[in-house]
Image: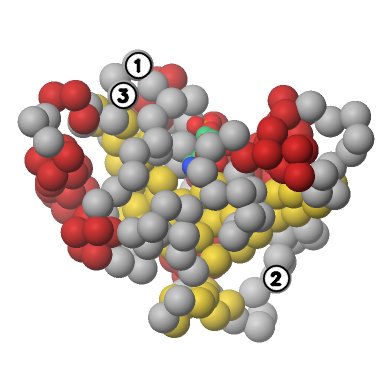
Amino acid sequence: KRKVGILISGRGSNMSALIEAAKQPDYPAEIALVLSNRPEAAGLRHATDAGIATGVISHRDFADKRSFEEAMDERLREAGIDLICLAGFMRLLSPWFVDAWRDRTLNIHPSLLPSFKGLDTHARALAAGVRVHGCTVHIVRAEMDDGPIVAQAAVPVSSQDTAESLAARVLGAEHRLYPHALALIASGRAIVEGERVRVDAEAVLPQMII
Ligand code: GAR
């Protein structure tokens, strides 16, 4: 099994979805470590309760971004991590870190990329009047919310939606999408080829996940 390290900054509901999925005996990845850059992140408690090793590496404890990221890199290597999953990790990673973990770092973003990179994606989707919204799991590149797409899930947008109701619908899709996308990468059924991901024709895709 591939060993996965999850980086979080807060609630950690996507982290919990990955932990839950990885309990299945045939799941191709094991969650070996959860790191948070914020000591008060609620997700830390959930990870500990699930019996997973956790660590806090607070960016505030370091003189600069480089030494903060070196500390994370070291901890991930010590734990023998093969793949990193960003799950609501709200710091932009430097090019050197992205290169060190090139094609081995996944992120989930709450929009159908390349639309709506950045923050406040749900309010911006409503303002744009889109009828379909969703979430994306992609391979991390140095540019924010950029990189080869592993999988996406679509949700409908209704005229009655608020940013909150839409966020809740997308979050439900995120919790199904991320375990599926990680399994594709960890099992080798999805392979990064340059700036695209090739998915095995036999990989079975759940409805609305494409
Ligand atoms: C999720 O909706 C995730 O897609 C988003 O933050 C939320 C974290 O929730 N990530 C980003 O906006 C990254 N740019 P969680 O901590 O409960 O998983």
Q: Which mark is residue 204?
A: 2
Q: Residues within 10 Å of mark 3 (few under 14, many from 20)?
A: some
Q: Secondary structure at mark 1?
A: loop
Query: Residue 157 at what x, y percent from top left?
Result: 84, 42
| Quarter in which the C terminus is drawn | bottom right
Q: Is residue 129 left or right of residue 86?
A: right
Inspect the image, locate mark 1, and give the three-letter code of the amino acid beneath it. Answer: Glu
**Mark 2 Cβ and ligand 1 under 8 Å apart:** no
Inspect the image, locate mark 2, and give the three-letter code of the amino acid beneath it. Answer: Val
Q: Nearer the viewer, mark 3 or mark 2?
A: 3
Query: Residue 146 at what x, y percent from top left?
Result: 46, 60
Q: Nearer the viewer, mark 1 or mark 2?
A: 1
Residue at mark 1 to residue at mark 2: CA–CA distance: 38 Å
Q: Which mark is residue 111?
A: none
- Tell me if residue 90 comes above or below residue 22 in the rendering: above
Identify the residue shown where x is 76% and y is 44%.
128
Q: Which residue is mark 3?
A: 38
